[in-house]
Amino acid sequence: MTKKVAPKKATAIKTKPKAKATAKTTKVVSKKETLIHDIATRVIHVGNEPDKETGAIIPPIYQTSTFVQDSPGVHKGYEYTRSHNPTRSRLEECLASLEQAQHCIVTSSGLAAEMLIMHMLPAGSNILCGDDVYGGTYRLFTTVFQNMHNFKFIDTTNPKAVEKAVKEFKPAMIWVETPTNPLLKITDIQAVTAIAKKAKAITVVDNTFMSPYFQNPLVLGADIALHSMTKYLNGHSDAVGGAMMMNDTEMYRKLWVLQNSIGPCHSPFDSWLVLRGLKTLAVRMEAHAKNAMIIAEFLENHPKVERVVYPGLPSHPQHEIAKKQMLGYGGMITFFLKGDIKKSMTFLKGVKLFALAESLGGVESLIEHPAIMTHASVPKKVRESIGLSDNLIRLSVGIEHVQDLLEDLENAFKGV
């Protein structure tokens, strides 16, 4: 039997009117004060008010590089699209609401958002990072920023280990992915953020795998909720982007100045695409989770599978923490095939509906081999030390009919 995903609680969120944008203030503009409850309603209505000029139900794309000023320095809140853009402002307003944040900044990619966060810290800062993170994050930290900051990688699922490392390493920031990529380890966000607050360290939680629909890091104590919008937020594999949500106004201003100065802004068209994709976030996440639970149970009982990792399974080491801080278990599954890399390659070539591709979170199901694909930049010795072996396969379960997906996997197993 599949586990029913807990219904979303109706939480009243007030979106306050915000000042027109300048280089020194927030860039979200809201026409009126609204009271919107459930996240399934917010994804459709916040930031999506009809166009005031024409009444168009779908907001227009402001595909422009610059904005005319009435006189030097006198404008309508927008000067140049690298700094601000009305379409991007609408997206940021919606995302801030979903993560129950005061501020949001969207960027050209998830890694661009991570870059801005690294630049925000004083040179020479100590950063405590989870040992199992997205390969691009690991590459960014250990190549581009290794000469600017000091990084220590540990298992953040162990609060005692985190507390010990904080005392010894004295980090300015703790970087957490939960669930992790690709081992799907779960970190107790409340426990780690409490440790961080005592040490006056900033906590960043990469919430990409869960989306704001299933998990809200800021509510659990984090300072920044980070997303690759490319994944579940957009949900249609046709736009790339990153997002950071926060409540600290001074932190927001620092990050905005960095974005405006360095330039990794999100394009108006891509912002419109993500805003459109967000409208179905609630129904998509429910469908992803429902399918993933069925497939995870199928894999766990399959004779050719060594082990399955899915937060919704009672066999998951941090299943109880997942139940505590998540309202659903998401659409990502990791499993270990019985056999060597050759059998893994044979299996991956045998699927038809599951597309062999990097990325995740789209409506279509994807399958990949992290050691060769998404995490190839992580040294083999490091991969093996954390359990990222050559027989590990990662699934991003889509929203197709689950029976078709099961048959596709079974046919691939037959070829192994």
Image: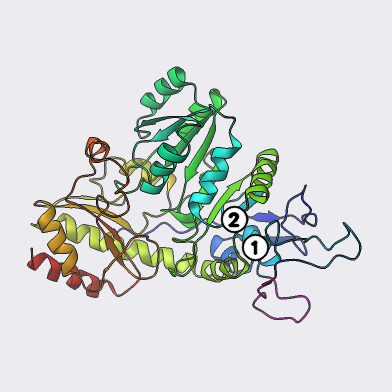
Which residue occupies 33% across, 64% down? 290
> Which quadrant holds the N terminus?
bottom left
- Point out the residue furthest to the right here: 71
Whether residue 138 is situated above or below residue 352 in the rendered picture: above
Residue bounds of the magenta highlight: 49-64
Question: Disc 1 vs disc 2: Cβ atoms closer than 8 Å?
Answer: yes
Which residue occupies 60% across, 37% down? 120
Front residue of 9/383: it is 383
Q: Quadrant of residue 84?
A: bottom right
Residue 146's x, y, as percent? 45, 33
Which residue occupies 10% across, 52% down? 338
Question: From the viewer's perspective, is 295 left or right of 184?
Answer: left
Q: Is residue 63 magenta?
A: yes
Question: From the viewer's perspective, is 346 left or right of 221?
Answer: left
Residue 336's x, y, as percent? 17, 51
Question: From the viewer's perspective, is 204 left or right of 48?
Answer: left
Residue 399's x, y, as percent? 35, 70
Judge the density around disc 2: few (<14), some (14-19), many (≥20) Cα neighbours within 10 Å: many
Residue 88 — which label?
1
Residue 149 visible here: yes
Question: From the viewer's perspective, is 24 left or right of 364?
Answer: right
Q: Quadrant of residue 389?
A: top left
Judge the density around disc 1: few (<14), some (14-19), many (≥20) Cα neighbours within 10 Å: many
Amino acid under label 2? Val
Residue 387's x, y, as percent? 22, 40
Front residue of 67/333: it is 67
Amino acid under label 1? Arg
Dominant secondary structure of the residues highlighted in magenta in the image: loop
Residue 106 — which label?
2
- Point out the residue furthest to the top here: 168
Q: Earlier in the sequence, mark 1 or mark 2?
A: 1
Residue 218 visible here: no
